[in-house]
Image: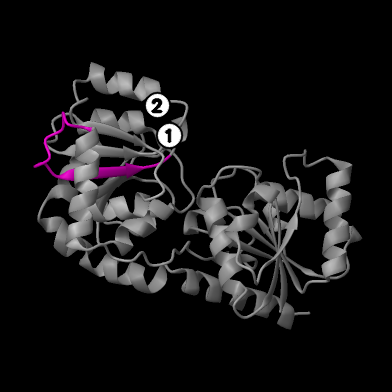
Amino acid sequence: MKIVQVLATSGGIGGLEQHTFNLANEMSLQHDVHILAHPCYAEKFNQRVHFHAVDFARSRWNLFLLWQLKTLINQIQPDIVHAQAGKAAELLSKIRSWLKPVKFVTTVHGTKKNKAIYAAGDAVIAVSQALTQGIPAEKAHVVYNGVYAQPALSAQQKQSLKAEIYAQHAEMDCTKKIIMCIGRLEPVKNISLLLKAMQGIDANLWIVGDGSLRASLQAQAVQQQVQHQAAFLGFRTDARDLIQVADIVVLSSDREGFPLVMVEALQADKAMASTKVNGVVEWLPEAYLAEIGQADQLHQAIENALSEQAESDYAPLFSRAKDELTVAAMTQQTLKIYEQLLQQA
């Protein structure tokens, strides 16, 4: 099968980008995969993936961009063209009448009010059940995000990693449990809510990530007198290793599609507390969930996740995540959708 994946972002790496890297690389093991993406992502794909550099920083109305996409896709002559997220879906919908006959798939990665642009696809993949709303039922498919398994750290490696963090944050009590939060320090992740929820919780909070709100969040921690519990670690390339030394993982977002942080936490056998965002509500038990924006409820969810009960509540989810939330499972489900489309041709 000859497949074109279109990733129309132009900088930064979040869940959408990581999903596309993993999917294209895994599909290339058995299929002829081409990726149309910004040149900044070239090194994220293995040598089996045919990389075509496209400057997606240009407007979705840019005629030269549309012409380049049309020309590239017609030269490749794929069986399937797969648009990852809204900009890619809109660009492809504009040029579809200029393309040679091809099946068109779109993926919804986040909450969108208007799904019309996605419904232009022959099939629409949503990364959580909630995101299928507004999509014709005959076109909608749910495929959860998956990740590659992370090698387990030895006890010595975990201790070394802890020692490194505590050496940089000597004011913290290294005997306390560790609550981990991973995400951009931007409004949508609502780390401010998490800091409020931390008041009265006897544990340390490690915040992994950076962004425009870092200074204001650090000031908030001081104002709330939790600065000795909250460590701002900044951007880390070893975030998944850090999850392994945490006791629990917390998500305080106002909006998500299907958070990879949840997948990584469950695969690392870590209980979670979270706001009721898309994807999470389809997996986590009610006792560990809080209404979006409710600090008191998130506080209680964190306390529940830190309790002994959490271990037995989460054990079945840990096993399920290792089976279902993998790159291999995500890829096979996606390929099955492609095959069904081609059989309709």
Q: Is residue 48 left or right of residue 104?
A: left
Report x, y in % for residue 306.
Answer: 15, 48
| Label 2 element class | helix
- Label 1: element kind: loop
Where residue 171 sits, quadrant-wise, is: top left
Position of the C terminus by quadrant: bottom right
204 relative position to 59: left or right = left
Residue 210 marker: 1
Q: Residue at 34% across / 28% down in the picture?
A: 192
Q: Are marks 2 and 1 in contact (CB under 8 Å)?
A: yes
- Residue at 48% x, 69% y is 327
180 or 330: nearer the viewer: 180
Residue situated in front as seen by the camera: 260 or 144: 260
* Range drawn in magenta: 169-183
Q: CA distance from mark 2 to mark 1?
A: 6 Å
The image shows residue 29, relative to residue 226, as above or below, that is below
